[in-house]
Amino acid sequence: MKYYLSSFKIGNEEVALKRLTENGNKKVAFINNALDFATDLERRKQSDAIDVSDLERLGFHIEILDLREYFYKSIELEKKLEGYDVIWTRGGNTFVLAQAMKLSGFDEIIKQYHRIGKQIVYGGYSAGICILGPTLKGLQLVDDPKQKPYGEQHSTIWDGLNILDYSIAPHYRSDHPESEDIEKVVDYLIENKILFKTLKDGEVIVIE
């Protein structure tokens, strides 16, 4: 697997993203479930449209993949994912995203992809990359862990996918509404001796 982990939107490494995907089919599964808590649906639609447009500008073919359609249907989801060159997971609430990934079985699928080194690129930003770390602890200072769009019966998930051995603090010291709270997240991670990396908006971690 290859990874393109951006703090915000596509970031400043478009050339690297093109290189990572140059031998693929350019088909992108766009996962936007981190915004499933949103009540302003028109604003959400506009935000997704900007992300899709940014990716299309680079020559990608985008299909929105709603994990809600695959809740308790992980075998179907795994078959669906076979058709994509890239999985792109946008920002939002990391705890909501974790719940969607668990209920659909995406969490186990992507961990298996990582273990076997599947030829696919995982990209995304903000919540979409924070989910890859070993823990979501600290993110409660910026994302509401009590958001339960899929039902209050589901317990808050505090474990990340553990694909990375460190947490990521995006929007660090950037011109972003969450940057101030990210400072608190960083303090929490330091205090609790959790390994982490910060990313300023524009910065990208590329793993090949």
Image (cartoon, rainbow, N blue to C red):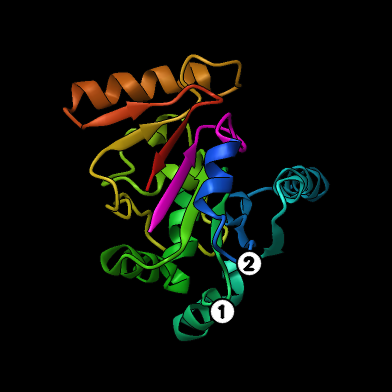
> Which amino acid does the dot numbered 1 rest on?
Lys
Residue at the spot 59% in from the left edge and 47% down from the top edge:
18
Point out which mark residue 26 bears. none
- Residue that mark 1 sits on: 80
Q: State the residue in front, 164 or 34.
A: 164
x, y percentage for residue 70? 55, 77
- Residue that mark 2 sits on: 65
Q: State the residue in front, 27 or 9.
A: 27
Is residue 2 located in the magenta-colored stretch of the structure? yes
Q: Earlier in the sequence, mark 2 or mark 1?
A: 2
Dot 2 falls on a residue whose secondary structure is: loop
In-image side of 114 versus 91 (left or right): left
Q: Is residue 145 visible?
A: no
Marks 2 & 1, CB-CB < 8 Å contact? yes
Residue at the spot 76% in from the left edge and 45% down from the top edge:
57
Image quarter of residue 186? top left
Secondary structure mainly formed by the magenta segment: loop
Q: Mark 2 and mark 1: span between their CA atoms?
A: 9 Å
x, y percentage for residue 174? 54, 16
Is residue 8 located in the magenta-colored stretch of the structure? yes
x, y percentage for residue 40? 77, 45
* Quadrant for the N terminus in the image: bottom left
Residue at the spot 28% in from the left edge and 45% down from the top edge:
135
> Which amino acid does the dot numbered 2 rest on?
Leu
Q: In this picture, which residue range is highlighted in magenta?
A: 1-13
Q: Is residue 205 visible?
A: yes
